Amino acid sequence: RNFKSRTACRNDINRLNAPFLAIYESLIPPEEEKGKQKQLMKLLEKLVSKEWPEAHLYLYGSCANSFGVSKSDVDVCMTLEDPDVNKPEVLLKLAEILESDNLQNVQALTRARVPIVKLMDPATGISCDICINNVLAVVNTKLLRDYAKIDVRLRQLVFIVKHWAKSRGVNETYQGTLSSYAYVLMCIHFLQQRQPAILPCLQGMERTYAVTVDDIECAYFDQVDELSGFGSRNRESIAQLVWAFFNYWAYCHDYANNVISIRTGSIISKRAKDWTRRVGNDRHLICIEDPFETSHDLGRVVDRNSIGVLREEFERAAEIMQHDPNPCVTLFEPY
Ligand code: GTP
Ligand code: MG
């Protein structure tokens, strides 16, 4: 692998701003999707409360973290007071209830890593996954949403990176590439590292929000309205940031030794985390620390083969951003 170091991007990079912004705008969900989601949540709350009066429903994932593109699936977490509840049993009962209310394609996946019920609501056309007591996902959804409020360039960058990853087939965890959640963490980390920084490290600041979930303390500064001008000393445009993001993952990241960590706002070493060798199925070939479950590497799904695919895609994207006359088309060409 020949590591190339680049210090400057193409001199016409800002010509690409308008087309990248147009792609971003075209991916933003229209307002009416929010209304349909609310309508579906109301229906689910009604159905669930009959059987489990103490249950609460929370939206999480891309419909709630502000990184959802139009027509995304809706992720819902149902919380029950009993922490040791039998999830398969509850999910099967829930599936039965949903089915008898004429929701479509109802399917309980009780043996998945995160057990869920899937459904499609014919009234709104929305597809939805419901999981049980996955409160950490609700909390990390809030963290991501709070980061997005600080500087609009995060949302722009994430939309473009997710669109690229889906177009190129590298947003498939079951094939060993990365989840959307992992890509968002990569974007936050990247903007924390810019000079001057575009994002702060919220978990390194005064704790204005704190909850304990599954014995994990989740605490950070969530008064983000006070940080609205944080990134304004950095004037980099979205085109420059897309270029630098791919350049970083193609040529600058030290895959052998480093872990990216939005929790600390910096890079930490694989050695410090004891992520230097394969343990079970976790190979740690690209290391992305979860902000709260710090023993959790979002890169754990990546294997010998898919790390090659990913790195080739990062290099392809970096080369396109450097040389291609029409990157806004070529970047997203189907693989
Ligand atoms: P799209 O559905 O692709 O638009 O994105 P998404 O934001 O919904 O992402 P994804 O389906 O990857 O994950 C849904 C949510 O589950 C994320 O926002 C996280 O809150 C949570 N999540 C996903 N993967 C993990 C994981 O490995 N660990 C933890 N703790 N949470 C995860
Ligand atoms: Mg989702």
Image (cartoon, helix red, strand yellow):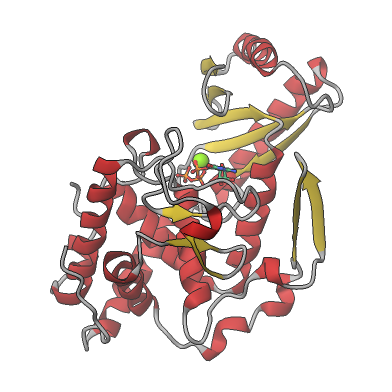
| Residue nearest the viewer, comparing 261 with 241 | 261
Quarter of the rendering containing residue 237: bottom left
| Residue nearest the viewer, comparing 19 with 143 | 143
In the figure, is residue 123 to the left or right of 80?
left
At x 43%, y 48%, the residue is 299
List x then y, in percent, for residue 19.
29, 71
Quarter of the rendering containing residue 52: top right
Total marks placed: 0
Query: In this view of the protein, can residue 201 be seen by the observer?
Result: yes
List x then y, in percent, for residue 282.
44, 39
Vertical order, 268 against 12 (above or below): above
List x then y, in percent, for residue 267.
50, 68
Query: In this view of the protein, can residue 155 be seen by the observer?
Result: no
Q: In which quarter of the image is the N terminus?
A: bottom left
At x 43%, y 51%, the residue is 276
| Residue nearest the viewer, comparing 139 with 102 | 139
Vertical order, 147 against 295 (above or below): below
At x 54%, y 90%, the residue is 233
In the figure, is residue 323 to the left or right of 283?
left
At x 37%, y 59%, the residue is 161
Vertical order, 54 against 205 (above or below): above
